[in-house]
Image (tube, helix red, strand yellow):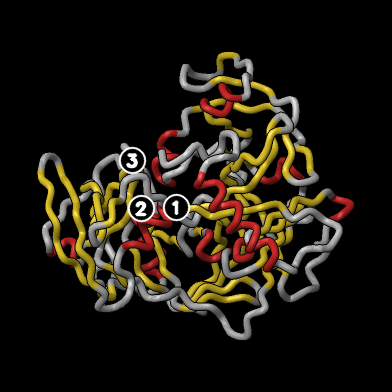
Amino acid sequence: MTSSLFHPPHSRWLCRTAIFASLLFLAAGAFAADEKNTELVCIRNRPLVSVSLNKIDPYYMLLDFSIPQTILSCEVAEYLGLETIPGLSPEIRKTRLDSFRCGNRPSVSSACVVMDLAPLCGLLGATVAGIVNPRVFGPEIVLDIGHGGFVARGAADAALHDEKDPRTVKMSVTGDLPTVPALLNGAMQRSCVLDTTFGGTVAVSEALLAELGIALDAAPKLVVRTLPGAVNDPVGRVQVRLKSVRVGAVEIRNPLCAVEPGNQPPCLGIGFLRHFRAILNFDQGLVRLETDAASPPCDAPVIGCGLVLAAFRDDFWTVWIALNSPADRAGIPPDSVLLAVNGKDMKGASHAEAFASLPSEEGQEAEITVSHGEEVRTVSLKAETLL
């Protein structure tokens, strides 16, 4: 990995992240003056919140509404010297923390399971301390992803009590996941899951696309070539564009839409939530989405050379390939290793650093050095609009 991100906070990556999160914290003026705004950072459009484990901080954990119990990585459990007992399988063990807090809110449960989080760490290119359901810190959750802020509130401090505000919609919980009514393309209302582990804007099934009048064979789309068994990620799916997605009083226009296999329910991810300040109250079953924008945001055009960062492995990023892109036309196979961009060594690069090095403006060109097996080659790739 690039750093020991969530072990003692002395790594260069964490220093950069802490500075970035502090700047976002200063920019956020939406939280009450007397409540503690906890750092929230996004890596690869996945939200990680700062927590204290056994009075040591900061450790950063992925937010996931679906998990019934907090998950700790094997490395963190070992570093903290936690005693573990066997779990339901040889790969899972159980433990208990003496102290587990997020900001000024203690967790309602200190019980954890310990697992190998290497696949998740490879996807993010950083060592994740664990995965936590934010509901363990209180019945009301505030996600202000655009300003890097997170707040958990107890029932006595909750801000949502009724649905009179037009920005507030009813929320139900399906399979532990919060769902809200959403209007797709201004015509079809569906219950959509709010999924913080989905980095995209919206995802729907192919059958639902057909109901919306979108024929996948004929629609403009972005298809990414991956490998069988690759870690599931929205960039590895087929993507199209919808006209709009609306929840209550807020809307996103021209959203990127991942096409889900089977009959999965539609979901809204971090690509949607990052445009708004979201308040979720699980006791009241309410969600309020707030924005200061004068007009609805739009998902920007996807512009690039067709290299999609896939996983961080042996100090380098592997790449997937967008079908019919400059990288595809150059014959670069999926699972190639990104070695250098314009002569700059990519060894140890974070996801943000590697992503920023690739051409992302129409017509921008870069010399890309990749390897696949024993073959190393350098090709010139020019960015173009992909979707």
Report x, y in % for residue 191: 57, 61
How many neighbours does mark 2 have within 10 angstroms: few (below 14), some (14-19), or many (20 or more)?
A: few
**Residue type at numbered disc 3:** Asp
- The reply to whether callout 2 and callout 1 are in contact (CB within 8 Å) is yes
The residue depicted at 74 percent of the width and 39 percent of the height is: 101
**Residue type at numbered disc 1:** Gln
Between the residue at mark 3 and the residue at mark 2, the CA separation in whole angstroms equals: 32 Å
* Mark 1 or mark 3, whichever is nearer to me: 3
The local secondary structure at tag 2 comes to loop
Quadrant of res 372: top left
The C terminus lies in which quarter of the figure?
bottom left
The N terminus lies in which quarter of the figure?
top left
Would you name the residue on which mark 1 appears? 264
Would residue 265 be seen by someone viewing this image from the given angle?
no
Would you name the residue on which mark 2 appears? 261
Count of marks, rendered view: 3
Would residue 327 be seen by someone viewing this image from the given angle?
yes
Residue 315 is tagged as 3
Report x, y in % for residue 346: 31, 51
Report x, y in % for residue 115: 51, 27
How many neighbours does mark 3 have within 10 angstroms: few (below 14), some (14-19), or many (20 or more)?
A: some
